[in-house]
Amino acid sequence: MKTIKMGLLTSVFALAAGSVQAGEIAVIVKTTSSNFWQNVNRGAEAAIDAQSEHTYTFDGPATESAIADQVNMVENAINRGVSGIVLAPSDPSSLAPSVKRAFEAGIPVVIIDSALEDGAEGTYQAFLSTDNCAAGEAVAQRMIEEAGTEGKVGIMSYVAGVGSEIGRVGCFSDYLTENSDLEIVGPLYSQSQMALALNQTTDMLASNPDMVGIFGANEPTAVGMGRAIVQAGKAGSIAALGFDGNEDLQEFVRDGVLAATAVQGSFAMGEMGVNAVIDIMNGEEVDSFINTGVVLVDSDNIDTDEAQNVLY
C-alpha cells in the first residue's frame, strides 16, 4: 500500500482548509435507494459526529444507471463551494471530468467503492474500496467448494463497466476458468434493479436446468436472484452465492437459499472516506489506496462479531 506524498497538492488543500474553518463535505453515492449505500451514509454520519468543524450532505441518484444525474450532483457540489467530496462513481469515465474540475477548484476528492478510469489519478487524493478482485476470487473459490469443478455457473451482474464490477466479476470468472472446468453462463446485467434481476435469473434457470451454481454480484441483484431461486423451487439444490449483506440476503443465508454472501465494509467506506477528506484538508498524508475489506458470511459465522460488524 503506497502513501501519497502530497507536496504541492497538500499545500493547496491545506490552504483551502485553513481559509475555510468549517464547511460542507458532500457524500455522493451511486444511489440512495439501497441499504448498502444507506449504511455508507451511517458511516459518514459517524465521522461527522466525531468532530465539530464540518457538516455533510448525502446524495445520490434514484438508480445506479442514472449517471447523468450523478454528474450533475458533483457539479452542483463544486458550484456551491463544498470543502470536500466523497464520491462513489457510477461510471469510471463519465465522472472523471467532474472530479478533475473539483481538483482544479482546490476541492479534495476521495473516491470510494469503484475506481475512476485510468488517467484520472492525481485528480483525487485517495481511493477506498473493497479489493474487488480478491473478493471475486474468494467467491469463486467458495463456488468451487460448493458446486464442484464441472457444470454450468451463472453470473448475475449489475452495471457493465463499473470499476467494482470489472474487478469483482472479472476476477470471479478468471478464477473459475483457471481452476475448474465450470462453464460460465452470462453475465447478465440487472442495472442494480432487483425486479430485473429476478426476471433475468428466472429465465436463466429455466434455460439451464442443469446449472450447478449462480452468483449475484451486488445487493439488489443478489436479492432478485435469491427470490427467483425460491420461486423456481431450487433453494438448496443450486450453489448460490451473493454479494453484500442487507436483511434479505441475511435471511437467504439463514434459510439455505444462499450458501454464503460476501459482505463489504460499507459503514467503513463512509466513515473512513469522510475522515480521509478531513485529514487531507488538514494537510495530513493519507494512503492512496485503503482496503475496506470483505467478509464471506455463511450460516456458520453469521452470528459472530466479525459478520455482525459488516451486516446491515
Image: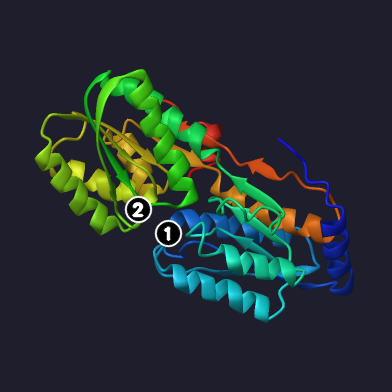
Question: Among all residues in the image, which is located at the extreme front?
Answer: 119
The residue under the point 48% across, 60% down is 90
> Circle 1 sits on which residue?
34
Q: Is residue 257 above or below residue 19?
A: above
Residue type (three-letter) at the residue carrying disc 1: Ser
Verify CB contact (< 8 Å) between mark 1 and mark 2: yes
Sort mark 1 into few (<14), some (14-19) or many (20+) by Cα contacts within 10 Å. some
The residue under the point 10% across, 40% down is 207
State left or right for residue 232 relative to residue 69: left
State the image quarter where residue 13 is shown.
bottom right
The residue under the point 18% across, 53% down is 199
Residue 180 in picture, x, y percent from top left: 31, 19
Of the image marks 1 and 2, the number of the one nearer the N terminus:
1
Q: Is residue 241 above or below residue 123?
A: above
Pick whichever, 217 or 275, lies toward us.
217
Residue 42 in picture, x, y percent from top left: 58, 58
Which of the image's four quarters has the N terminus?
top right
Pick whichever, 122 or 253, lies toward us.
122
Determine whether the residue tagged by mark 2 lies in a helix, strand or loop: helix
> Circle 2 sits on which residue?
220
Residue 227 in picture, x, y percent from top left: 23, 47
Determine whether the residue tagged by mark 1 lies in a helix, strand or loop: loop
Q: Is residue 20 above or below residue 289?
A: below
Across the whole image, how many numbered discs are drawn on residues?
2
Alpha carbon distance from label 1 to label 2: 8 Å
Pick whichever, 212 or 96, lies toward us.
96
State left or right for residue 214 relative to residue 142: left
The residue under the point 44% across, 40% down is 168
Can residue 141 be seen?
yes
Pick whichever, 95 or 253, lies toward us.
95
